[in-house]
């Protein structure tokens, strides 16, 4: 009998933890003109990186300004509506768009800005980002990790161990070898879904292995030049270690022709806040 | 005696010394019509023949449009991706040292072969892979030696589609007064001692062992007959010299212990190989071996490290070829044995393998000692190696095809060190995408560039099996294989044919091969609104893509047949040998991954009927000009490339998983001889499936 009470107590505790994780102190959520939900991420400081991670994850203090971030990954339905094509291998309206190059992602950002009468951030000739523009862009690597961590300091938002990852992410252990519809797993404490797993997310920054040793403390935006762009969050094919908040990946920005079958790259957008 | 064949066939050595020595007299080219000036343009040059092997298509003709010297050269065009097309010429080769050289050019980056055969039995005497990187005439030169006179055949040609011009072929005999040192048999302190250029072998009566020393005087290995291994007070009771000439020696040694007797016949030549023929059931060779390598030329080598095992004895697959990398990184023992029912055990001794025991099944065992500081190297791949070029603290002792294994997709994968650094992210492979090629040399120094895709994880073991620009004075392990085993066995192990990529290009190709390349080339036609005028070209492109998709799909189905047959084999074996269930279950899990990967990708790879529909739709756009044609084509392009990308990715995955099965069978069978027998069968079947991969699975000769 006592055992049963203990079981029930633990189950209730578990539910409570999950509810806590899904509600938390959720920041404000807005609906854009296109009808997409964005979370207002309050500016602040955090420790970026993880001393237990790879050598490119050296912990350091970073401050980022307030910004909006898509609550969900960009899904195929939205991408196709705007770009009139769907490059994804794993078709499904609500599935995240994948097989997108970095360059495809920023073209989408500009198209979405234009649709809402905002100033596009990207120069599609030079691929440079105007961070002062009020349109959509890819998150800087620092913005991405800050939004992902949502105030937490552990390897994952729910702790240092990965057992609970299956509640928050589609990754190697539970994805069945393919991306899954966005928003089916629990969000992070700030209400953002799929920050871990499903598809890797393009960031705006060039990748540099030792960038953290030279990056500015305030709003770091990556090295000026580079060969590859940063990807974050892990994907449906990743092991738990690659889904950590601080794990860094990188890829050629022009890459991802569908011939090459890279169905692990997707993205979400951010935009500056006037607040 | 087998080991004399090495000297006879390949390298006699000392060429290096010969070429460095003063007093080399002027040499004469023994190839007639070497500049291709005699003969009519459009025909074969006088005294030359041509050959198209294995379904090769194309032509070999004289041309006056290109020449390195004079007015003509020979032009080779290979129009399909099958077989080997080449001109050939008979030459009389006498004993001595030669330089084989020629000039070549191509209009694209291309790899081609240069070979010299013995015409009496078509044994390969020299086989080099040559690379042309630019459009310029380039000289190629290879040293080559022979101890005997025989009719030879020069062959230079293409195994891949492309165009090649050749001129000024030379086979020049170098004269030299230097003689190769004779084999000597001596008696020292009552023991028989054999001495040649590479080895000093002491038949130690009191110790009851045969001691194998390098020429630098370092004891490298000890040998006793297997029946007497571990017995106290083993003695060599007699040593009888059966043959003693300048070129060869044979010694029969009788061993005894506890009233038991066993004899072994040893044969030596002018090379680092000793032939060992035990009268009993085998030999035990003791040596401080840090890694044991079972090479594979179709898949990845098995690398056994003592630290990974707690058992005292490992039973390993007997695949005619084994290398023991000696402690100190300055020596390698190469073991070979002919086809038979041999058994091979590795004995652990602390952190090392202390012995290799070979039950010889009545056949000879060949043992060669290859000695050079840095002949192999172990590099710990530190986390700090991530995403940057790292010069490691090791230099290659000589040029060769140096290889290592690194993790790719979680599976150990062989990489050959390149001769220079590749462009950043300049290397592409299906499934992995773009990455920086991870290993190369800058002059003799070795470099690594590891990243998130090929991560710095574990150790990298660097060693070589095959020649690549290797001086003739140096023996490669593959030379030992060639010199000691019969041609059929050697060819089946080296399997040059199986290492080549299969062709995915339509024989009468119009636009290109893969869906991306073809649709990329068709795109500007639609963009310019020229689709009606270029209707035939577009039709050809769709046929190219259907051919490509058909071949890729066939390949995926080959893997499925392989996996289903393997499941059947494992199921039957489980019934016969229930005691091996746990090993067989592990193998089944991996095999089922091959089936699951196909099932998983089925919807994305679609079928050929779907490709035909796409072809009809694409061709329909060429019937009439329409402003919407370009957009319609771009949609179809996405469909074509979606199909192509999915099947490329699938085949890459199938290849990787099948290699994993090949590896795991070899690593997990070490517990019992019975398991080894099953593992050998799994590996035989696996290699058969992995032969002739498509270029999206792995690169040629990887």
Image (cartoon, coloured by chain):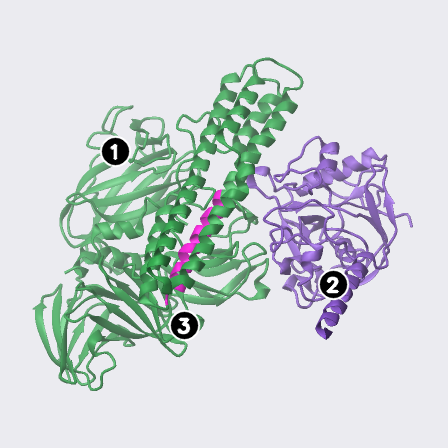
Q: Nearer the viewer, residue A156 or B476?
A: A156
Chain drawn green, letter?
A: B
Residue nearer the viewer, B134 or B341: B341
- Marks 3 and 1: same chain? yes
Residue annotated with mark 3: B306
Could you tell me which chain the residue with mark 3 belongs to? B
Residue numbers of the magenta segment: B651-670
Which residue lies under the disc numbered 2?
A: A158
Side of A86 where B598 appears, left or right: left
- The subunit letter for the residue under badge 2 reads A
Q: Is B663 a magenta residue?
A: yes
- Cα distance, mark 3 to mark 2? 40 Å
Drawn side of residue B686 relative to residue A163, left or right: left
**Same chain, marks 3 and 2?**
no
**Mark 1 vs mark 2: same chain?**
no
In the rendered structure, the colour chosen for chain A is purple
Q: Position of residue B460 (x, y in %)?
A: 47, 63
Asked if residue B138 is positioned above or below residue B276 in the image, the reply reads above
Mark toward the viewer: 3 or 2: 2
Picture quarter containing residue A97? top right
Image position of B368 (left or right of B432): left
In the rendered image, which residue does mark 1 sit on? B51
- Extreme-right residue of the structure: A275
Q: Is residue A253 above or below residue B444?
A: above
Q: Going from the N terminus, do you reach mark 3 or mark 1 first?
A: 1
Q: Nearer the viewer, mark 3 or mark 1?
A: 3
Around disc 1, counting alpha carbons within 10 Å, would you say few (fewer than 14), some (14 to 19), or many (20 or more)?
A: some
Q: Is residue B416 above or below residue B546?
A: below
Label 1 element class: strand
Report helix, strand or loop for mark 3.
Answer: helix
């Amino acid at each position: 009998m006592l055992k049963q009470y203990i079981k029930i107590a633990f189950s209730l505790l578990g539910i409570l933890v999950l509810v806590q994780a899904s509600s938390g102190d959720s920041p404000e959520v807005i609906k854009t003109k296109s009808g997409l939900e964005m979370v207002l991420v309050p500016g602040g400081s955090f420790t970026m990186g993880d001393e237990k991670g790879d050598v490119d994850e050296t912990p350091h203090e970073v401050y980022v300004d307030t910004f909006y971030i898509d609550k969900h990954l960009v899904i195929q339905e939205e991408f196709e509506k705007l770009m009139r094509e769907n490059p994804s291998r794993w078709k499904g309206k609500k599935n995240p768009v994948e097989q997108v190059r970095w360059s495809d992602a920023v073209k989408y950002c500009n198209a979405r800005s234009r649709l809402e009468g905002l100033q596009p951030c990207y120069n599609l000739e030079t691929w440079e980002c105007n961070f002062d523009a009020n349109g959509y862009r890819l998150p800087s690597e620092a913005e991405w990790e800050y939004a992902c961590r949502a105030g937490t300091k552990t390897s994952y938002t729910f702790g240092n161990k990965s057992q609970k990852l299956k509640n928050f992410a589609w990754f190697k252990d539970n994805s069945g070898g393919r991306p899954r519809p966005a928003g089916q797993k629990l969000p992070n404490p700030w209400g953002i879904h799929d920050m871990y797993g499903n598809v890797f997310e393009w960031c705006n920054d060039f990748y540099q292995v030792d960038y953290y040793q030279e990056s500015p403390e305030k709003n770091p935006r990556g090295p000026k030049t580079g060969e590859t762009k940063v990807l974050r969050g892990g994907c449906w094919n990743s092991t738990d270690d690659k889904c950590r908040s601080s794990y860094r990946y990188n890829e050629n920005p022009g890459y991802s022709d569908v011939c090459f079958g890279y169905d692990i790259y997707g993205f979400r957008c951010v935009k500056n806040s006037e607040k | 005696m087998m080991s004399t064949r090495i000297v006879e066939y390949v390298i006699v050595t000392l060429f290096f010394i010969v070429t460095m020595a003063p007093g080399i007299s002027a040499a004469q080219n023994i190839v007639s019509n070497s500049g291709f000036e005699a003969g009519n343009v459009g025909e074969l040059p006088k005294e030359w023949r041509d050959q198209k092997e294995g379904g090769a298509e194309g032509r070999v003709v004289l041309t006056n449009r290109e020449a390195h010297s004079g007015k003509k050269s020979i032009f080779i065009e290979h129009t399909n991706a099958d077989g080997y097309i080449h001109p050939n010429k008979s030459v009389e080769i006498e004993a001595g040292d030669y330089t084989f050289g020629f000039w070549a050019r191509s209009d694209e980056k291309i790899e081609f072969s240069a070979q010299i055969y013995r015409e009496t039995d078509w044994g390969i005497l020299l086989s080099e892979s040559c690379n042309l990187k630019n459009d310029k005439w380039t000289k190629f030169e290879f040293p080559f030696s022979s101890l005997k006179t025989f009719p030879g055949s020069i062959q230079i040609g293409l195994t891949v589609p492309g165009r090649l011009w050749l001129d000024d072929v030379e086979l020049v005999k170098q004269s030299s007064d230097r003689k190769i040192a004779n084999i000597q048999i001596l008696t020292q302190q009552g023991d028989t001692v054999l001495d040649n250029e590479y080895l000093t072998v002491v038949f130690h009566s009191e110790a009851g062992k045969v001691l194998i020393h390098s020429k630098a005087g370092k004891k490298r290995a000890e040998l006793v007959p297997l029946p007497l291994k571990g017995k106290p007070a083993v003695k060599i009771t007699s040593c009888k010299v059966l043959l003693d000439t300048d070129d060869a020696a044979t010694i029969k040694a009788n061993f005894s212990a506890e009233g038991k007797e066993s004899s072994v016949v040893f044969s030596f030549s002018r090379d680092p190989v000793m032939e060992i023929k035990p009268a009993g059931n085998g030999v035990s060779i003791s040596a401080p071996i840090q890694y044991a390598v079972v090479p594979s030329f179709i898949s990845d080598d098995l690398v056994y490290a003592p630290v990974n095992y707690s058992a005292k004895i490992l039973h390993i697959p007997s695949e005619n070829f084994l290398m023991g990398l000696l402690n100190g990184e300055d020596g390698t023992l190469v073991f070979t044995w002919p086809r038979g029912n041999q058994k091979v055990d590795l004995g652990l001794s602390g952190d090392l393998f202390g012995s290799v025991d070979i039950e010889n099944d009545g056949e000879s065992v060949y043992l060669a000692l290859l000695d050079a500081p840095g002949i192999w190297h172990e590099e710990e791949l530190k986390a700090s190696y991530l995403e940057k070029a790292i010069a490691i603290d090791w230099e290659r002792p000589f040029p060769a095809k140096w290889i290592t294994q690194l993790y790719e997709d979680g599976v150990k994968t062989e990489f050959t060190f390149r001769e220079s650094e590749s462009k950043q992210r300049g290397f592409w492979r299906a499934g992995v995408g773009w990455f920086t090629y991870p290993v190369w040399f800058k002059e003799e120094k070795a470099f690594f560039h590891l990243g998130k895709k090929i991560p710095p994880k574990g150790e990298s073991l660097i060693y070589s099996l095959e020649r690549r620009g290797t001086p003739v004075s140096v023996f490669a392990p593959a030379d030992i294989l060639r010199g000691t085993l019969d041609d059929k066995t050697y060819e089946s192990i080296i399997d040059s044919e199986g290492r080549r990529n299969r062709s995915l290009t339509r024989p009468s190709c119009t636009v290109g091969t893969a869906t991306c390349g073809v649709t990329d080339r068709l795109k500007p036609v639609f963009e310019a609104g020229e689709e009606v005028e270029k209707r035939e070209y577009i039709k050809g492109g769709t046929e190219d893509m259907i051919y490509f998709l058909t071949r890729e799909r066939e390949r995926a189905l080959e893997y499925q047949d392989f996996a289903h047959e393997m499941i059947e084999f494992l199921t039957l074996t489980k019934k016969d040998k229930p005691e091996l269930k746990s090993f067989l279950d592990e193998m089944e899990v991996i095999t089922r991954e091959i089936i699951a990967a196909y099932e998983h990708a089925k919807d994305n790879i679609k079928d050929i009927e779907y490709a035909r529909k796409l072809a009809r739709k694409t061709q329909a756009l060429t019937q009439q000009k329409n402003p919407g044609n370009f957009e319609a084509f771009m949609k179809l392009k996405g469909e074509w490339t979606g199909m192509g990308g999915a099947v490329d990715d699938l085949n890459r995955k199938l290849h990787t998983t099948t290699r994993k099965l090949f590896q795991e069978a070899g690593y997990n069978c070490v517990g019992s001889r019975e398991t080894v027998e099953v593992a050998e069968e799994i590996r035989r079947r696996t290699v058969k499936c992995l032969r002739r991969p498509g270029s999206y699975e792995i690169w040629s000769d990887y």
